Amino acid sequence: MPVYTDQDPLNMDKWLPKTLQSIPLHTLTAKSECAGKYVKGKVVCKGPLLNMGDHVKYLLKSVIQDVPKQSQASNNISINVVLFGGLAKDFSHAVNQGDVVVLWGFTVSPSPTFGKDKLHPCNLNLNGAEAHVHVCAATAPAAGTSGASATVLKPAAKYKYVPLNALKHGSQVNVYGVVTFFKLPFPTKGTDYCSTLKLTDPSGATVCCTIFCENQENHPKIFKAGDVIRLHRVKVQTFGGAMTLVTCWGWSALTFDGAVSSPVVPRTNNKSFHFSEEDQRMVTELREWAAHGLTALRDPTVPLSAVLPKQYFDLTCQLLAKARLDSACTLLKVWDGTRNSCPFLTIPVEPEALEGDCPAGRDGQNLIADVLVYDNHVEVAQALKPGMFLCIYNLHAVPQAVPGEDCSVREVLSFHLHGGASYGRGLCALPSSSPDVAKLQRALQSCAEQMEGDMNSSLDDLSWFTASQFIDGVTWECQTVRKCTHTLQKVSLAHVKSSSPPGVFHVEAQVKSYQPKRLYQCLKLFCSQCKTIEEIPDPATLRARFGQAVRDTRPCRAAWADSVTTDTQDHSRQITLHVSSKSPAHSDSKLIFVQGASFDEICHLSSDEEFLIPVKSSRGKLTFLDSMVPFLFRGKRQFYGCRQCSVRRLVKCVEGIEVWNERSISEGLGLQLMEYVLVMKFELDDGTATLEALLLEDSDSFFHVSAEELTHSQEAQEKIQKIMDSLHPPDNSTLQRPWLELCLSLYAVDENGQREVHCQIVNTQTRGSAVEQ
């Protein structure tokens, strides 16, 4: 994330990457496509450097204004620029008020201060390695202001590059090469980290390069064989009769993605480097040569679907969750959107020890790989965050025999990243600009779409789709509006907390946190008659309860139904379908009572039949199953009855119903229908106080999605997750959280003889739109 400085404003555009295009400030909106674009403006205000004391560490806010050449249409529009981390510190040292700057690698977000400062309605945010600032100082920088962190570009610099077949022992050279093999940085016995490379070029020579550097982050950023590297000021030595390159004082490196179609953008942490049109030409030529002339370059990357037992391979994947098993082993749960015919070994982990979300259903058995990371790789694994895209090098697929469900032995694959650095073994996070990440995202999106049709995806995989923000490359900009008719002045949360119930208040606040984080945990069953709220049984529990019921295969006949018996796949039991002879007029739908079917079997049957009721035999009569299993299956939807309010009796003929639906059928069967509700707890913050507020009664209108729809619709699940990611971004950045207009209801309830005060979000709706990134 370098800050470049230049004394000549005419040089600024010359030194920009050729792939960048200018975008005027007045055309920027929150929906603008920012990739490959830059803005140019004059610094009219520069705020102080703030030490945030958290993972962001530094923050600086500045204001830039369109330069005269661009300002004819924009009327000298000014925009807030927010810089984070090391870039904010570099900007503070190198940039002064009056300087002209060019910014790229930024993101655009709505300005929370637009109503107060009347500047541009959006902010420019610069954070991470892809953000860049190029500044032309209005005057020569004073001593100590530019510092070592600012880059001084010297157009007159001219470097000579030596072909690898012309290296001479003892000389100091600059070289370009294509990486054919590499080892990620590993600690030495001293204070440095060491990484090794093998390079080649069109001369046909191959040389090894050893790099020593105290800071691991300053090593060349190589992600795969075929990447291009430029090395300055490296020393040539002879070792074992072959020429080798070794870093010495003043060395530097730039690396580039090896894909021919990717932009020529240097990867480096150095704050000072030279890069000209000649360099860009050399990188392009090396890419073309490697793509067509380097036939020996083999890509060891293998998708999970093609992994074979005992194979060593490289894996490009996304991290879903992780857990530390002990000091020498970390578990990573990863996927790449492909399935293997062989099931994968699942490592049992306590839920509280797992960081991140991961589906627990049977779908993950050959889709999600549990990777055990050992020894020297544990430190890197612990620094990774769920949602990151990774490359794991020299991963080992180990076949393992485990007991099957029927006392047989089956073979599964377990995955191990062994200790050491042999064969390039290691792992690292991939940048979002990597072509491999774009390819992986497409595979993940395709897999998620296929899973939408899975009969068990409704509840089994609700947590699965909480990772969708990492897949589709789309963010969700969201605001709230109050739909109440109250004419109230806005008050602070401190005022609300000090008030006595009952009361209604209008506030403006941010979401500091929310619970629960997993979407399926937000869904509950609610009885409108007795006000009971119960948890929804997970699929494993339902399979067990159905398993007990199917053990009873005694025949049972009902006079009011036509019964049909069919064999199951295991031939140890039969399924009996009791088709009701009564149905509403002008309806072709049939009410079918299913006896002897497992949970998975009745889910499969419900894809073809609209109304299925699971039953069992008791003393020759049909009765309902356990009180906490669905009494009705309608496609992917499942409906429950309240065990306290339902008049449970023998199954009888359902008559006198004009229209069949879940409510009329439950009444005909003597069951009290339970409704699906979405329950969430928000921690609100407005700077004066924090306040916990429930979202319960108005959750459907808040999200514009019904809780019942969430049980079977992936689109509804993703919509709510995107809204929550907008209200509370996953990176927990306070500046990116929107300010919400909310209506709060304060009320008191008596629980266990004590009076407790609660707060609910009411009469509030979200409004949002999708924004391409």
Image (spheres, helix red, strand yellow):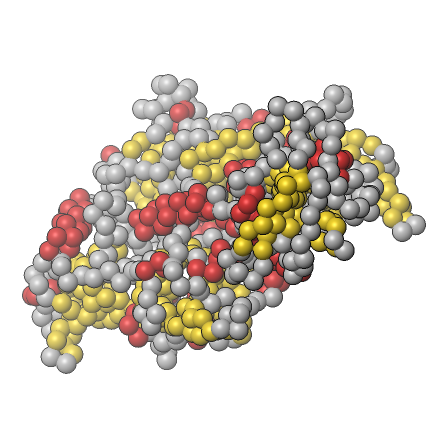
**Viewer-closest of 469 and 593:** 593
The image quadrant of residue 647 is: top right
> In the displayed structure, does residue 72 sit left or right of residue 361?
left
Residue 382's x, y, as percent? 49, 65
Question: Does the rendering let one see residue 602?
Answer: yes
- Number of callouts: 0
The image quadrant of residue 685 is: top right
**Viewer-closest of 503 and 613:** 613
Image position of 595 with respect to 673: above or below: below
Residue 733's x, y, as percent? 55, 46
**Viewer-closest of 664 and 134:** 664
> In the displayed structure, does residue 666 sit left or right of residue 465?
right
Q: Residue at x 66, y 31 (%)?
A: 583
> In the displayed structure, does residue 606 sit left or right of residue 20?
right
Residue 701's x, y, as percent? 66, 30
Q: Residue at x 19, y 70 (%)?
A: 208
> In the displayed structure, does residue 220 sit left or right of residue 676?
left
Question: Does the rendering let one see residue 100?
Answer: no
Image position of 160 with respect to 402: above or below: above
Q: Residue at x 55, y 28 (%)?
A: 114
Q: Residue at x 26, y 52 (%)?
A: 257
